[in-house]
Image: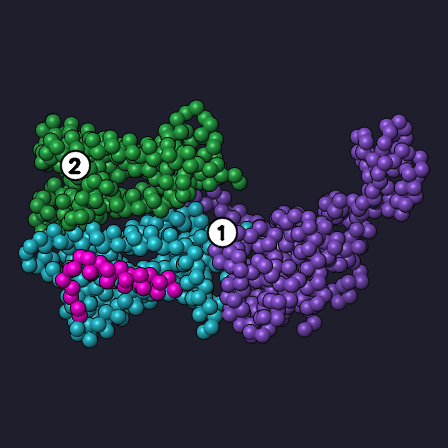
Chain colours: A purple, B cyan, C green
Amino acid sequence: MEKAIIVDRLVKNFEITEKKPGFSGAISSVFSSKKKVVHALRSVSFAIQPGELVGFIGPNGAGKTTTLKILSGLLFPTSGFVQVLEHDPWNRKPEFLKQISLVMGQKNQLWWDLPAIETFKLNQAIYEVPKKEYEKTLEELVELLEVKKLLNIQVRRLSLGQRMRLELIAALLHKPKALFLDEPTIGLDLVAQQKMRDFIYDYNRKLGATILLTSHNMDDLVDLARRVIVINDGRILFDGAFEELVNRFAKEKIIKVYLSKEDGMNMIEKIGKVKKIAFPQVILSVPRSTTAVAAAELLQNFPVSDLTIEEIPIEEVIRKVFRGETGKRSSGIIKSGHLNKKGI
Amino acid sequence: MKKYLSVFEISYQQEFAYRLNFIMWRFRNIIQVFITFFMWTSIFAGSNKIIFGYSKERIFTYVLGILMVRAFVMSSRSADVSGDISRGEITNYLLKPINYFGFWLTRDLSSKVLNMIFALVETIILFLILKPVFFVQTNPMLVFAFLVSLAIAFFIYFNLLFLTNSVPFWYPEVAWGAQFLFMVVIAEFLSGSLFPIDVLPAVAQDILMLTPFPYLIYFPLQVYLGKLSTAMMLKGIVISGAWLVLLGFCLNKIWKRGLKAYTAHGR
Amino acid sequence: MNKNSFMSVMTQRFVFLIFLLGKIFRFITFGAFLLFLLKGTGGLGGYNINQVLFFYLTFIFVDSLAQVFFREVYRFRPLVISGDLDLILVKPINVLVRVLFGGTDFIDLASLPIILFFLIKTGQILNPNLFQVILFVLLMVNGLVIAMAFHIAVISFGIITLEIDHTILIYRDLLTFARFPIDIYKEPLKSILTYIIPVGVMITMPAKALMGIISPSGVVGSFLFGGLFLFLSLRFWNFALTKYTSASS
């Protein structure tokens, strides 16, 4: 198989009926409804190699979840070509379904009142996983996610983090070749988020599954995705290496300083662009290349009690991409050269 | 197939998670039988006359029979489908290599099995308490016809329930109301689970027998009681069979349309 | 309080229209069934058609009235579980009043006039004199008092066990026994329905009063019973409050 996922000029429109508020609105909507067309995806194209781990980022309503749903066969395209693992997803053939998995944050597949192990058994039967394989996979996953003690407890008694780990197992028992994760870290605390990311990374490495994950939590992408596709308003704005995204649109770094004394504070403008100044904290942004020098200067000339160097918040990076701050128009697709030799 | 056996198992287990609910449901079934039983007892007080074509034995058999037939035909989990659709949880099953109808049919079956076990026990207990005169059908042909009509009833109910549960594809807010109106009010009343249809005037009966509802409970019981001529029995089976096919066809079409229109809820 | 329930209901009017239709359909079809049944049998348990129909209508009316007043009880369980009951307990208004009343349902209210119409119609056929009508009304009020006692008992039970929905359903199911005059039930069921779960006192008695077939001891007994039941339920309520463990989230 050359490519695991091929998407070519995919268009998806939704028809939404606009309902007027109130009682008279409800009645009139039965007779004549105003229909509005929502262009969720406007000619999206990309290709993913088997075993790649790709991050799909964009603001709410950008079209990320819609794309995932089309790739897993839940929605049908308005026009365009879609192929996943050499199948047309919309046909939903059993052979296709057995090889994919879609995990959506809030959509639980575990049976609520029963222990998770029961849902696992059910999935084993549905996906027709041979007994030995099932047991081996289960053991591996349980160990990786540290849920051994939770298997026999009723799902509704578990915390969100625990449930999510078990949901993952349920989704991976059949060793899918293509894994779609929609906002996998949403609602989790920081520790759980990191664990989730580590797991996804390991899974991709060990089993070579093609993984496509959506997020608007940028830390997910920092750790995981080497390739990033930025989507907004149904259009792809960037498709390439994560580092390149950062380099092109994040030319600066942030230095956060905590001062122990207030005097001389206004001189700090000389070191870099002041973003926020409120004793004892000062936030500066400095060009990437001169960050070390700037930091050294601060430490030498100012009464610094604490200093950290950070990336620009990724939200800002994205905002810059959307605004096309490299000077290019935002309607173009900014492709990173070396990743698209065989571009479709 | 092993898949469906697994579904049966897990569904069965799920029923026990809602023990109290289940027991309440059985309790209410029994109360209804009690009330109906006493009503008919006082109607037949002392005498051995025939009322609406029923003798004492036959009417009491009808009343007790409702318990078993109802447990078989109307026990179902498929009422949960509308919730699945409204909450978007249906996507979980669309992603799996399993037939959605097959899935729910199997779930219904597990519910029916459980309910029938209880109904059997209840019927025996009620029989011992109330000591009605019971009528046992001995004609093998009629028993066979009875079973056939039960099978048809089983599937008609499934189709009706599933059709009403498809409403949330288009009108998610109305789902509950539609289900209540259709299944609880109309189907329960017109199916003969409260009273035998032949209490109503002939005109009303004729009209009703053209709808699918009486074939859920009333018709199978009539077959069992031997109250129908062969011609009427065949007519009933043909009409109910036709309804079965029609409803199945509609369900298929509506479901396909619904899935397409469905914007797979959630973000 | 009442206004809020109204507003939230108004916004789902279409759904409630369906429920209203369902209620009316149920009411009419069973009534029609009774009519046809009785036409064929000539009566039930010694009562003629009109009387039986009147018993049925009294049942529907009392049931609907009770639902109109006490709808709020259906919202009690989430109140206890979420701990919001605490907020009510600290307010100066009588807790019981707040928890029982205020949840008036639009549908029930809308269906009342229709039921009342039929009730009066069937009542008129029985030709009661003024005294009997007054007695009927008084005994119906007594019936509502018993209904209230029932609901108080239910929520008291709910405070202790957190089980409310099922107990309410049991109460409603038992009430349906009184669709017919409870004389048709054999002992010991009849006594149970009179002394222990007094649906007979709630419904059969008032109807009998209108028909002029109730004994003076029956009247007195009914009122005494109503008072006793209310008293017991209030004791139970106070007891339940002492057992109340405020739920924390």
Q: State how many labels appear.
A: 2
Crowd tier of the residue under label 1, counting other residues whose Cα lies within 10 Å: few below 14, some 14–19, many 20 or above: some
Main secondary structure along the magenta-highlighted residues:
helix
Relative placement, left or right, of B225 versus A48 is left
Where is residue C177 shown, x and y percent of the image?
22, 46
- State which region is magenta: B110-137
Crowd tier of the residue under label 2, counting other residues whose Cα lies within 10 Å: few below 14, some 14–19, many 20 or above: many
Res A45 visible: no
Task: Indicate which label's residue lies in the foreground, 2 or 1.
Answer: 2
Q: Is residue B77 above or below residue A218?
A: below
Residue sitting at x 32%, y 49% = B181
Relative placement, left or right, of A159 versus B53 is right
Q: Is residue B77 above or below residue A255?
A: below
Chain ID at mark 1: B
Relative placement, left or right, of C67 versus A334 is left
Q: Looking at the picture, which amino acid does disc 2 mark? A: Met
In the image shown, does A73 or C145 lie closer to the viewer? C145
Res A115 visible: yes
Determine whether the residue tagged by mark 1 lies in a helix, strand or loop.
helix
Q: Give the residue at mark 2.
A: C205
User: Is B132 inside the magenta-drawn segment?
Assistant: yes
Residue sitting at x 29%, y 51% = B28
Q: Looking at the picture, which amino acid does disc 1 mark? A: Arg
Q: Are marks 2 and 1 in contact (CB under 8 Å)?
A: no
- The label shown at residue C40 is none
Determine whether the residue tagged by mark 2 lies in a helix, strand or loop.
helix
Where is residue A285 shown, x and y percent of the image?
83, 40
- The label shown at residue B87 is 1
Query: Residue farthest to the top?
Result: C92
